[in-house]
Amino acid sequence: DALTIEYARRNAEKLPELMTGRVPAFTLLFPEGGMRLARALYRESVTARYQHRAVAALVGEIARRRRPERGRERGPERGPVRILEVGAGTGATTDAVLPALDGIPADYRYTDVSRYFLDRARQELRDRPWVRFARLDIDADPGPQGHAPGTFDVVIGGGVLNAARDTDASVRWLARLLKPGGWLVLSEPTAEEHWVMTSLAFMMTAPGDGRAETGATFLTLGQWHAVLDRAGLRRAVTLPGAGHPLERLGHRVFAATTGGGPGPAPSEEPPNL
């Protein structure tokens, strides 16, 4: 976690300038326009590694169960598993998920609001022709942005919805993108972290949801469950489970479904997590 600690220390040193706007927060995360620090930040911590493994295990299991058995190719499960990742950013979640799809025909759409991230990802993933790239703003309806409702088996969000202006609206939009029986798989912090409040929080959109009332940076676990419920999704998995060593840190992985499709059973935890 050396680079994460370095980043937190640098932000603490620059806190007066960050608060007055004399130093833009993104220049500390992307010094000289480079990605080295940002890539490490979203990959090297123990919570990040756990979340990426959990998301990859869940998506891989869902994809395998949605594929038809050999010799039984008829029906709605025919064709590649269609996966949309929102806010893919530096590709930390993508790097974990793609290997979990080895051997499974897939159509993976990598999206972000920033063309900077999309251009870099196109170069880094150019040897995977089944990965496509598109712009998507989570603060706007995906339909007019070229992402049709009811077309994806899985929608993934790796630590991006805490930056949404209205989490309820964004999750409802993402839920509408799912096919019947489709899955929404999210990783999100659910507890305040002081180092985030003095660094990444300066780049987050001012919230218009439950956080606006409390002044919190992140939704709580209970608020997240309520968001998924209001979107009409059935909560199936929340990780880490009770008693897990990482439970008290508040970083969570959620898997919720539109219902009626194959996937992890309620409260089912992937092995080795």
Image (cartoon, rainbow, N blue to C red):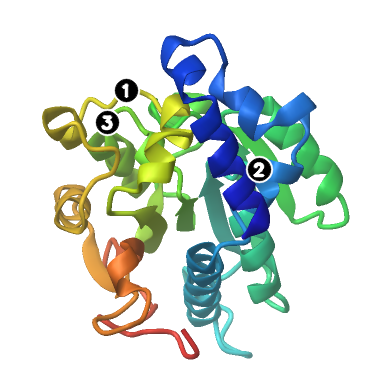
Give the residue at mark 3: 166
Crowdedness near tag 1: few (<14), some (14–19) or many (≥20) residues, C-alpha within 10 Å:
some
Q: Is residue 9 left or right of residue 159?
A: right
- Residue at screen point 60% across, 51% down: 4
Task: Report the mark closest to the observer, 1 or 3.
Answer: 1
Q: Amino acid at mark 1?
A: Ala
Give the residue at mark 2: 38
Q: Amino acid at mark 3?
A: Asp
| Nearer to the camera, 115 or 190 | 190
- Residue at screen point 55% across, 57% down: 83
* Gap between marks 3 and 2 measured at Cα: 25 Å
SS of the residue at dot 1? loop
| Nearer to the camera, 50 or 259 | 50
- Residue at screen point 67% across, 51% down: 3
- Residue at screen point 52% across, 77% down: 57
* Gap between marks 1 and 3 measured at Cα: 9 Å
Q: Is residue 135 left or right of residue 196?
A: right
SS of the residue at dot 2? helix
Give the residue at mark 1: 206
